[in-house]
Image (tube, rainbow, N blue to C red):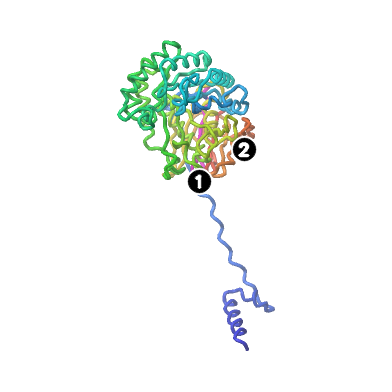
Amino acid sequence: MSDGMLARRELMALLSAVGIGGWLGGGAGRSVAAPAASAPSPGPARADVSVRLDRDRPGATLTSRFAGLSYEKDKLPQPMFTAGNDALLGLYRLLGPGVLRIGANAVDRCAWLGATPKLTPILPAMVDALAGFARQVDWQVIYGINLANNTTELAAAEAAYAVRALGDNLLAIEIGNEPDLYPHNGHRPRGWRYDDYLTEWRAMARAIAAAAPSARLAGPVAASFSSGFTLPFARDAAAQISLLTQHYYRADGRDPESTLDLLLQGDPSLAQQLQSVSQAAHDSGVQLGWRMAECNSFFNGGAPNISNTYGTALWVMDFMFRCALNGCNGVNLHGGGHGPGYTPIADDKGEVVEVRPVYYGLLLFALGAQGKNGGQNRGTTVPATVEGPAGLRFSAYGVLRDDGGVNVLMINKEAETVVDAELLLDQTTSTLEPFWLSGADLAATSGHKLNDAPVSAQGTWTPMAQAAVPVAAQAARIHMPPASAVLLRSRP
């Protein structure tokens, strides 16, 4: 007998001992052991929460104009904001009447009538096209004018033309952009401070007021919540401005620590910052309060392949409601272009190429802010008390409508946890009309839908009918998959 045969017999004996020798040996009459049953795969984690609106703590009064968009001024020479850009017109109309801000860093690199060499020329025909676009969609405009590289005469002439062209669609004229960063970006020397800025701003504001007495002014367009700019400006310029403006980004998009997880955690300092500006606007009697005129996830265009993910749709709704609950009167999400950053609407030289996740969040927010029938119906934001597991990334907000109804937005930011929410309404209604936001996962850059339908690059959205949510004894139960949000609107 060969060593090979002996080895095979020893192997067979060993395999037989563990119950599979009958399969390998092929012996007649041997029983074959059944494979061990595999353990069932665990289902997703689950959490139960209860949600009740805190009706005694009202925030801002909302219409769809709370939601807005912001663009660099050098978008005006592109065939973008025109009455013939049907796709962009469609996307703006879906949001309802809003506020478009034109300015940002490029405002200080633009020159009226091309009067300053090496700066982007802004011509009357471009302002006329913007005005035609704004009238088509019933949006108001915050129009930015160069402060860093300009003369008071040119500023006054441009403002006067913008006032005539935009008419009732002009919300305010904004002078410059992020002046607190002028020494950093080379617009002004080191040591140039707030007092220097205020002197320059006042000179330009006086020239604009003389040329266009009906123009409302906004400012200071500060980059950060520095007590050295926005707060003193609210006091010092209160007699000249109608709108206080401020900017916000969570962190630097070029920093490796600027992650989606950081964004979804929320900013622990945000509420205090918002309240400080709200108090300053209130104490100074600023007519239109204040607006977050430029903001998004991370500055420097966003964090690539983070600021354009589905999770940002959930973040932006949280952010906008926190702004409203802390006294802000509107938010403009910055965008433009088609890089892997934060733009709500991706465009290639003005042509819409993609609708990004932040737009979906804006759309769901606007549907809640507009009230039951859309248009200019008003609602008042209220916070919600959420009782559930500690650390659960789940939030909820309410809008008390003028017609007596209520809208409730609930957001499940958990990647793998199903949330079963009991909504306690404290008012009688038979059903709730749902608008469901869904995505493949938090990090997905495509596949997001609102009521089972995408928003197309052609500016259309055809939502699928959803089953109404029943209400019994003034309460409803809502099953929320991971990474989802739902707007629930009561019916009279």
Picture coordinates of residue 345, whole percent (x, y) = 55, 33
Answer with left or right where residue 129 lies relative to residue 292. Answer: right
Q: Which of the marked residues, 2 or 1, is nearer the chain's N terminus?
A: 1
Asked if residue 412 is among those painted magenta in the image, a careful observer would answer yes
Instruction: Give the quarter of the figure containing the C terminus.
Output: top right
Q: Quadrant of residue 148?
A: top left
SS assignment for the magenta stretch, majority: strand
Per the image, label 1 sits on a secondary structure element best described as: loop
Question: Magenta residues, as a range?
Answer: 402-421
Residue named by callout 2: 452
Q: Secondary structure at mark 2?
A: loop
The relative height of residue 174 versus residue 48 in the rendered view (above or below) is above
Residue 219 appears in view: yes
- Please state, as top left, top right, bottom left or bottom right, where the N terminus lies in the image: bottom right
Q: Does residue 487 appear in the picture of this structure?
A: no
Please give the name of the residue rendered at 60% of the width and 79% of the height, measured from the top-left corner. 12
Q: Amino acid at mark 1?
A: Ala
Give the residue type at disc 2. Answer: Asp
Height in image: 307 above or below 102?
A: below
Tag 1 residue: 415
In front here: 335 or 4? 335
Which of the 4 image quadrants contains residue 59?
top left
Quarter of the rendering containing residue 182: top left
Q: Nearer the viewer, residue 117 or 44?
A: 117
Q: Position of residue 74 (x, y in %)?
A: 51, 27
Residue 147 drawn at (x, y percent) = 41, 22
Q: Which mark is residue 110?
A: none
Query: What's the distance in space between the residues labelled 2 and 1, CA to CA?
Result: 19 Å
Q: Position of residue 235 (x, y in %)?
A: 33, 20
- Whether the residues at callouts 2 and 1 have beta carbons within 8 Å, the answer is no
The residue sitting at 53% across, 15% down in the picture is 165
Of all residues, the one furthest to the bottom in this rendering is: 1
